[in-house]
Amino acid sequence: MSTPDMIRIRDLHKSYGSHKVLTGIDFSVPTSQVVVVIGPSGSGKSTLLRCCNGLEVAQEGTIEIDGRALLEHGRLLPEVQLNALRTQVGMVFQSFNLFPHLSVLENVTVGPRTLRGMRRAEADALAMTLLAKVGLQDKTGAMPGSLSGGQKQRVAIARALAMEPKVMLFDEPTSALDPELVGEVLQVMKLLAKEGMTMMVVTHEMGFARDVADVVAVMDAGRIIESGAPEVIFTAPREARTREFLHAVLSAQGSVAAALPPAASADAAAAATPLG
């Protein structure tokens, strides 16, 4: 039996004026799987991700979250229903977006207390559990300004988890970090993946995509040009544009030796079937 889809996107189109950002996206994220979206800058990855919680509104298409329409034929849910559905979709941004005037503990508890009506003691207990999960149980009283970038991002992950979402969206969560801090954030994301959290991740971290993703989707010019298992995408991609992108990225990251051959075999290319 196939795994049900947590996110289902059909015929999604998004433009800014005359500039087309997303063009006919058909895409699914199965429950309890990790789908990593890669591709060159400007290909539409972050816009696609932000459409999945209504931060961006596509002009055409349908998006369903756990079987419920977030966007239907280009029409977004009314605000009250939209906000209710958003509580099921955790979002982690590249710029952390912590409340600077609130402590670490307060940042994590503000959502459950204000949006879910959770009592302070219950919210504090949940926050302590989540901060321990991300390795920050000793930072509950700290202010965001005193934290490193990696610590801020781990607080942001704990804050998103405090709403007990059904799916987590990560928009390049390590791109604003110093290289030595990237690993601590990726380690938390790997833990979530092992626990079965449904995740859609936009990233340039090819090692994470190779090691953790169930599916890697490649975007270029507003389209998903191919998708498949990491071992297929990274060793025998079907599309020349994918090979060109991976060669450039892996060369820059010093791992080109582990990258793809110049041409994909027909058998491997056939295995890299599109999502949806």
Image (cartoon, rainbow, N blue to C red):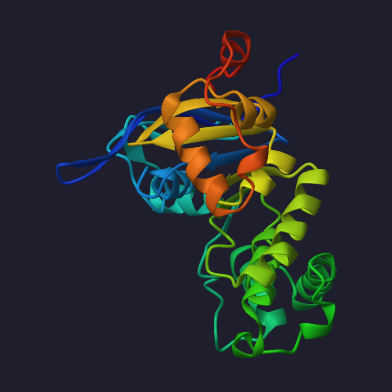
Question: The N terminus lies in which quarter of the figure?
Answer: top right
Q: Residue furthest left?
A: 18
Q: Is residue 60 left or right of residue 185?
A: left
Is 129 rendered above or below residue 204? below
Q: Is residue 146 visible?
A: yes
Which image quarter: residue 18?
top left
Q: Nearer the viewer, residue 131 or 270?
A: 270
- At x 82%, y 71%, the residue is 135
Q: Is residue 15 left or right of residue 53?
A: left
- At x 49%, y 31%, the residue is 243
Residue 33 rendering spot, x and y as whole percentages: 70, 35
Q: Nearer the viewer, residue 138 or 163?
A: 138
Is 234 rendered above or below residue 250? above
Is 140 rendered above or below residue 97? below
- At x 61%, y 51%, the residue is 205
Q: Is residue 59 left or right of residue 129?
A: left
Residue 14 rendering spot, x and y as whole percentages: 29, 39
Q: Nearer the viewer, residue 157 or 76?
A: 157
Q: Is residue 23 left or right of residue 18?
A: right
Q: Is residue 202 visible?
A: no
**Total numbered labels:** 0
